[in-house]
Image (cartoon, rainbow, N blue to C red):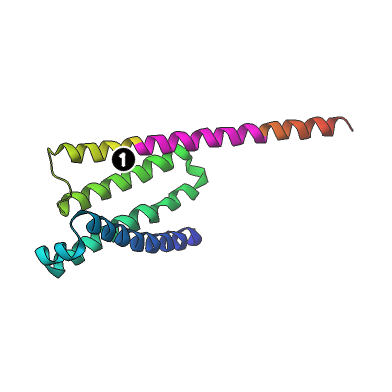
Amino acid sequence: MRGFWKQTAIRAAIGFVAGVLVGLGILAVSSGVQAFFAKNGAGQLARYLAMSGLLGAINEGTTTIYSLEHWGLLRCTLTHFAIAMTTICAVGFSCGWFSIGDPLTLWILLSETVAYFIIWLVMYLRCKREIRQINEALKGWKNSQGDE
């Protein structure tokens, strides 16, 4: 379990850096970092980047949930989804990225939900195929053992 938490911390640190970089990228494409800084000041820029980093850290850090094999794919996916959506909503509403009643907010959250379903479905089908291949290999091995 110690390795699990160490891996979580490493992934969270990587996620934080990635989140800050994505946040900077979004600022650069949307209004420009300098324009945001001039309009909102250093404090708001730091808050924006810290929240972007937090979002990245939590989303990437919690991917270690998928290494808990005894949980199963559905439980891991639903747990990660719940953590990610809670974080996205908390950060999005606190930073003013989302607003209640805004169709774009609903579209973003719905898109996130659909993306999680697609990811789960692809992973489920891949695991199912791998299990079928393992079972076929075991049958082949069992048959070859019986011939001797």
**Helix, strand or loop at mark 1:** helix
Drawn side of residue 108 relative to residue 119, left or right = left
Residue in the image at 69% along x and 31% along y: 136
The magenta-colored residue range is: 115-134
Instruction: Give the quadrant of the C terminus.
Output: top right
In the image: residue 129, left or right of residue 117: right
What residue occupies the far bottom of the structure in this picture? 42
Q: Is residue 117 magenta?
A: yes
The residue located at (43%, 63%) in the rendering is 10
The image position of residue 11, as x and y in percent, is: 42, 59
Q: What residue is rendered at 39% in x and 52% in y? A: 62
Residue 17, above or below 113 = below
Most foreground residue, 67 or 136: 136
Magenta-drawn stretch, dominant element (helix, strand or loop): helix
Q: Nearer the viewer, residue 128 or 104?
A: 104
Q: Position of residue 34 (x, y in %)?
A: 17, 66
Q: Quadrant of residue 127?
A: top right
Instruction: Name the residue rendered at 19%, 41% in the picture.
Output: 105
> Pointer 1: what residue?
112
Q: Horizontal and vertical percent for residue 137?
A: 71, 35
Q: Position of residue 91 (x, y in %)?
A: 22, 53
Left or right: 6 as drawn, with respect to 43 = right
In the rendered image, the vertical position of residue 28 relative to residue 119, given as above or below: below
